[in-house]
Image: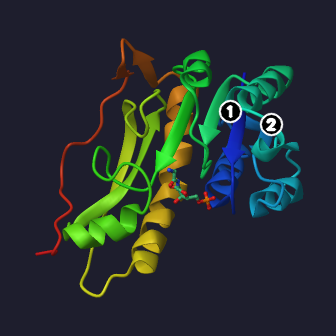
Amino acid sequence: MARRVAVLISGRGSNMVSLVEAASGPGFPARIALVLSNRPDAAGLERARAAGIATAVIDHTQHPTRERFEQAMDALLVEHGIEFICLAGFMRVLTDWFVERWTGRMINIHPSLLPLFRGVNTHRRALEEGVLIHGCTVHFVVPELDAGPIIAQAAVPVVPGDTEESLAARILVQEHRLYPQALRMICDGTARLENGRVVFSNDWDAGGALRSPSP
Ligand code: GAR
């Protein structure tokens, strides 16, 4: 049976759309049962509605504390029978209470090769540091920001003349492939959290390398 997944967004929701599209394919072990935004004006809400997905807004500015905001989210997620949460451009820091309630069942996509460049402005910082390979990571969420066990990563070259925008666009293409892959892995049990580590039940090809500059 397909797992019931909620996608939490704050903005345009392009990763959410990639998850919705993947989950609508035959045999995918998850279905997107709810798209939840903390911002009423998130553009992704309209995109979710257009795809026929249930949407909800829990506006953090309408709650006196972070805890009350999260209690409202948690109640709604439980009401919708949600089993897994995907954070997709959800720009609120979550408390330990919420994170611990969803341990092993909540994942996030981050626009860098973690543990490099936790936090914001990842592409700007990658350019400042002069790294020649950059990328994105899907990881289980733990209380420490962007520090959770890694499920999947994708790398891209950084090339001369790159800007924050060109790099963001190159990585976003990979995010849209990586996130559905990672969601599939946690929903079909190929990747699971055990004692703070990700355990994989399959193997994969160790051949090849991404070189930047390419030879
Ligand atoms: C994505 O690039 C995602 O990796 C990033 O926000 C963007 C959301 O785009 N997430 C973070 O920075 C989380 N710290 P989207 O709304 O189009 O999916």
Relative depth, front residue between 112 and 202: 112
- Residue drawn at x 50%, y 64% is 172
Query: Could you tell whether 190 is left or right of 78 in the image?
Result: left
Judging depth in this view, the residue of 38 and 189 nearest the camera is 38
Q: Is mark 2 on a helix, strand or loop?
A: loop
Tag 2: residue type?
Answer: His
Is 21 left or right of 50, judged from the image as shown? left
Residue 191 placement (x, y as % from top left): 44, 26
Judging by the rendered image, the residue that carries numbered circle 1 is 66
Q: Quadrant of residue 156?
A: bottom left
Q: What residue type is labelled 1?
A: Arg
Q: Distance between the residues labelled 2 and 1?
A: 7 Å
Assign a secondary structure to mark 1. Answer: helix
Q: Residue at x 21, y 67 (%)?
A: 129
The quarter of the picture where residue 121 lies is bottom left
Residue at the spot of label 2:
63
